[in-house]
Amino acid sequence: MKKPLIEIENVSFQYDYTQVLKNISFRVEEGDFLALLGPNGSGKSTLLKIILGLLKPMSGEIKLFGESSSTFKHREWIGYVSQKSNAFNSGFPATVQEVVKSGLTKKLGLFKRPTRDANDKVRAALKAVGMDAFMQRNIGELSGGQQQRVFIARALISEPKLLILDEPTVGIDHENVQSFYDMLVKLNREQGITMILVTHDVDTVSNRISHVACLNQTIHFHGYKNEFDNISQDAREAWYGHSVRKIH
Ligand SMILES: Nc1ncnc2c1ncn2[C@@H]1O[C@H](COP(=O)(O)OP(=O)(O)OP(=O)(O)O)[C@@H](O)[C@H]1O
């Protein structure tokens, strides 16, 4: 049996008086490539924040790598790339290499200088996302898609076992979105990194993922991608509120 990396049991959450998540239960196992789908405001980012330990659920339990989230010590095993990370303007004074290396700060300690080993890691992480030729470039000079790859490299440098990506393709044009997803598949299949991808891009990702979770306050579906394909359009629209296929 595959190892569960995330186990969510009956989790509920509310901000002030607004209930956002209600009795959420599902698990993510080692090697899964999960697309987390849901309309705007359905609680996707809130759920990610709970998984990352940034918010505490009102009730329910989260286990990470088999251990209660409240005592889990290996946060570096979980890499996270947020929705807005690719928002640098062209004058931002940092090279690609510096941005990726900043992902190591926690491990190195603030006053230790990166070693040759660290530089090798930066190069390897950039190679994994197809950006090793851009090491000396200013981050602000890159396209949105290239910046997003650099931020994935920054997350990869602490050698995560699980990568969580919150709508990483916002602002990337259609052609580059395809190769961006191919790069994620490679990380999943060749490096064995488990993936959770929040996306509205269901058509584009559908032949690349293994599992789908549909969230709209509660989990309306969680299962294999093939099972998701068999859900009728009416049933999809019932939980989504409108057609899943027309959303971008
Ligand atoms: N800090 C906050 N305080 C109060 N309400 C919040 C806060 N953050 C989010 N919400 C509300 O919680 C609900 C879920 O928001 P959340 O950001 O988790 O949804 P989402 O599915 O990630 O949306 P999107 O697809 O638009 O990013 C929304 O109604 C939102 O307005």
Image (cartoon, grey):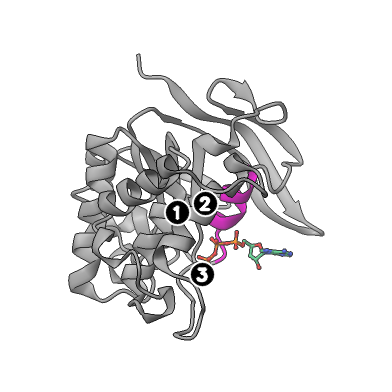
Measured in 3D between alpha carbons, the distance from the residue under mark 1 to the one under mark 3, in whole angstroms, is 14 Å
Dot 3 amino acid type: Lys
In the picture as drawn, the residue positioned furthest to the right comes out as 16
Q: How many marks?
A: 3
Location of residue 167 (image quadrant)? bottom left
Q: Horizontal and vertical percent for residue 191?
A: 28, 35
* SS class, disc 3: loop
Which span is picked out in magenta?
41-50
Dot 1 amino acid type: Arg
How crowded pointer 2 is (Cα within 10 Å; few <14, some 14-19, many 20+) is rated as: some
Q: Which residue, given by chain and number where applicable, does mark 3 sit on?
A: 84
Q: Horizontal and vertical percent for residue 114?
A: 51, 47
Which residue is at 51% across, 35% downward? 77
Q: Quadrant of the N terminus?
A: top left
Which residue is at 36% across, 75% downward? 144
Dot 2 amino acid type: Gly
Residue 42 in view: yes
How crowded pointer 3 is (Cα within 10 Å; few <14, some 14-19, many 20+) is rated as: few
The stretch drawn in magenta includes residue 43: yes
In the picture as drawn, the residue positioned furthest to the top comes out as 1
Measured in 3D between alpha carbons, the distance from the residue under mark 3 to the one under mark 2, in whole angstroms, is 17 Å
Q: Earlier in the sequence, mark 2 or mark 1?
A: 2
Q: Earlier in the sequence, mark 1 or mark 3?
A: 3
Q: Which residue, given by chain and number where applicable, does mark 2 sit on?
A: 103
Check if mark 2's residue and mark 1's residue have beta carbons within 8 Å: yes
* SS class, disc 2: helix
- Between residues 138 and 54, which one lies in front from this camera angle? 138
Classify residue 74 as left or right of residue 190.
Answer: right
Classify residue 5 as left or right of residue 208.
Answer: right
How crowded pointer 1 is (Cα within 10 Å; few <14, some 14-19, many 20+) is rated as: many
